[in-house]
Amino acid sequence: MRIDLPPERTLPDKGERAAQIVATASRGRRPITRLWAVPVAASVAAATVIGLSLVFAADDPAGTGPPAPSPGVAASATAEPPPAVPDIELWLRDLPREEAAALATDCAKGMGRTRSVFEPEEVLSAQVQRGMTGLGRTAVVVAEDSATGERIGCEIPLRYRGTTVGMGAALMRGPGSKSTVNDNDATHPAIPTDGPGGYSLGYQGGTYQVDERVASMRQRFVVDGEAGPWHVAPAVDGYVFLQVRIAERDLVGVRALAVETQVLDHDGNLLDAPGEQEDGGGVSDSPGTTRTDDRSGDLCEVARPKGQISSSTCLG
């Protein structure tokens, strides 16, 4: 049996109907992007960085996505660019000098220094920062023994005070110190020191000596060319303790990893970025307004055992 189909009916508003169908199907969709791990503020239950913007759970409790366009209004063909990644403020509060002196004394004992007690007036810099190593809020103290000239830097998780759990300590100058003492100059507003900090998988921290031009410093991870949030720390009495972290799960399958560091003045302008401590003393020339450090070694630790990257990447 043969069935003859009727001729196709032409719709005069065919183009308009197609545009409405596309607009309706696009509602509620969100781009799939990297999820940046960020510490949660005490006043916020949960926060996730999506599409390089910080979205709090309270902003969209039902997960309904963006609001639908008004009836009769065609959706825009050009998507709005994602908002800038919000900064992560590391500084939480100042640390009273009396409390800082007690913590410095604990730190000195942990280092085996002969000096047993620091006085409040011997504290040079003291603050409390967000914990970036899973040990909670951290006290950062720089103190100097007025009698011997020993200067120590301490990083102490407050929940473990009185113990050496998570303690980071360094003899920054004075008798027995192997640290190089450098002075800030016109092209070195911030210079690295041998104070608290260090490197581990997905983490970088450091203590910088800064002059009066510096208001703050910031660091961020750049993953396969995609920049994460800036981790920002203010200058506290001539020192900046800067740290940045990325979750290990966000490094799986990554091909390129770097850390960028910048120095800002009191008007938010970029100053010369830190150079590098040189063997025998001195600091290398500033690399410009942005310092970029390759962290490909982290990718080797994460991916090489799984065969996800080549050995040439690990060998640098």
Image (cartoon, rainbow, N blue to C red):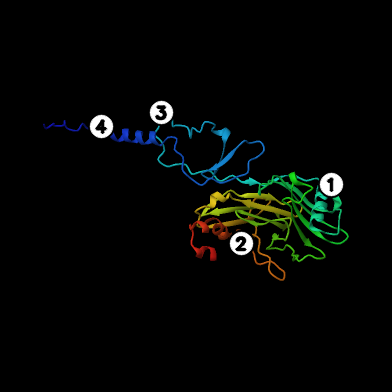
Mark 2 crowdedness (10 Å alpha carbons): few <14, some 14-19, many ≥20: some
Q: Position of residue 193 (x, y in %)?
A: 72, 61
Identify the mark at residue 201; answer none if there is no mark. Answer: none
Q: Which residue is mark 3?
A: 71
Q: Position of residue 100 (x, y in %)?
A: 80, 48
Front of the two marks 4 and 1: 1
* Disc on the earlier residue, 4 or 2: 4
Q: Which residue is mark 2?
A: 288
Q: Which residue is mark 4?
A: 12
* Disc on the earlier residue, 2 or 3: 3
Name the image quarter holding residue 206. bottom right
Of 39 and 306, nearer the camera is 306
Q: Position of residue 221 (x, y in %)?
A: 58, 53
* Disc on the earlier residue, 4 or 1: 4
In the image, is 91 to the left or to the right of 287? right
Residue at point 53% right, 45% down?
A: 35
Q: Secondary structure at mark 1?
A: helix
